Amino acid sequence: MSQPWEPGDTRGPLMGGRGGRGQRGLGPVIQTLNVPSGDSVPQLRHQSPGVTTAVPVPTPHGATAAPHPTATTDCVPTAPLTPSPVCCCVSPQALCSVSPQDLAVPNTGWSAAMCEQFQRLLRRAADGSWRRIPSYRRGLDYLPEVVQMAVGVVTRPGPRLFLRSVDEEGAGFEYAIFLHASGHRTQCLCQLGPYLEGHHGFAHGGAIATLIDSTVGTCALAVAKASVMTAKLSISYLAPVPVGAVVVADSRMERHEGRKIFLSCHVRDTKRDTLYAEATGEDMWCCGDGAGDTETIPQNCASG
Ligand SMILES: CCCCCCCCCC(=O)SCCNC(=O)CCNC(=O)[C@H](O)C(C)(C)COP(=O)(O)OP(=O)(O)OC[C@H]1O[C@@H](n2cnc3c(N)ncnc32)[C@H](O)[C@@H]1OP(=O)(O)O
């Protein structure tokens, strides 16, 4: 059952704030605990009957967890700004912190099951065999901060990643993707919220396809280390996914030929009792010839 935030909670941009989301989520509350000064990793404590789980919260780009502006209205320069020599369109706001928020961390909309599984995957990642991939609201947010500054990108509303298009915590896709050290496998832990409903009580097939495409696409990106596009996606829907369910989409590269990367994906419940969907996909390097070797990246794809 949801409980209110305690006064004094350091509900910073990592929690609930989400650049203006600010709404109460649909699931149990994650409470930010005060941490000693100098400790850059806050702990979140999930509160639900019988479950108390400390959740370490990674921060984007290895930054500290100190609160930072989440919207241009919060962005007040502290020193006179000089125009950038590289771009005349840089605004003062653009020179402020534009650190995007990493959204692949617990929020108030995550269910107890989601938090529990997230903890499990973090523990598994502790030996370096997997790593959690940060996730931001917009494609542009994936650019390093200094690049954003140089091109004058500000933290204003703009195109959003489809999976991050719902602001209300717990209502849409809540997810975190983990990448295997091999670079050839991804797992996406995902809670499918009520705005993703198709038939009453069940997730829309398009939502499942989005989850699969994103998991497969991320795997292909990791393989290609360059820009890729989904060329083909074939999905067998084997069982309906209840709204609110926590699932794991598990994708791996099967092989690659020239510009094509062939991948598979399976979506299961967290206990692996139910196989909800299985899929195969073909992603393609957007440029170059793929060279038939994942270690050989076409030069003109290097910045993808
Ligand atoms: C949460 C974070 C998420 C991050 C990951 C996000 C993942 C999201 C992924 C997406 O959703 S991408 C968006 C959906 N996909 C698209 O919009 C792709 C649209 N299609 C294209 O842009 C082009 O068709 C494509 C780049 C795939 C290929 O165009 P090209 O002009 O580069 O290919 P071309 O026509 O020269 O054909 C080259 C070879 O590929 C083959 N080919 C082309 N399109 C194909 C296709 N669609 N399926 C299978 N094979 C294809 C084609 O037959 C040929 O084979 P051969 O060499 O054997 O002759």
Image (cartoon, rainbow, N blue to C red):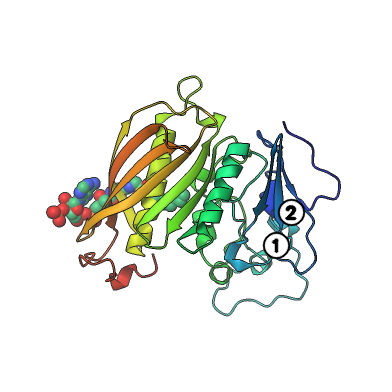
Where residue 9 appears, as percent x and y from the top left, is: 81, 50
Q: Is mark 2 within 8 Å of ligand 1?
A: no
Tell which of 25 and 255 is nearer to you. 255
Q: Amino acid at mark 2?
A: Gly
Q: Is mark 1 within 8 Å of ligand 1?
A: no
Q: Which mark is residue 223?
A: none
Task: Answer with the quarter of the image where residue 301 lies.
Answer: bottom left
Q: Specify the quadrant that holds the C terminus.
A: bottom left
Tell which of 9 and 23 is nearer to you. 9
Task: Answer with the quarter of the image where residue 46 lies.
Answer: top right
Contact (Cβ within 8 Å) of mark 1 with mark 2: yes
From the viewer's perspective, is residue 160 above or below residue 130? above
Tell which of 104 and 297 is nearer to you. 104
Q: Residue drawn at (74%, 54%), measured in percent from left and top?
A: 12
User: In this figure, which residue is indicated by the disc labeled 2?
Assistant: 12
User: In this figure, which residue is indicated by the disc labeled 1?
Assistant: 65
Q: Is residue 73 visible?
A: yes
Mark count: 2
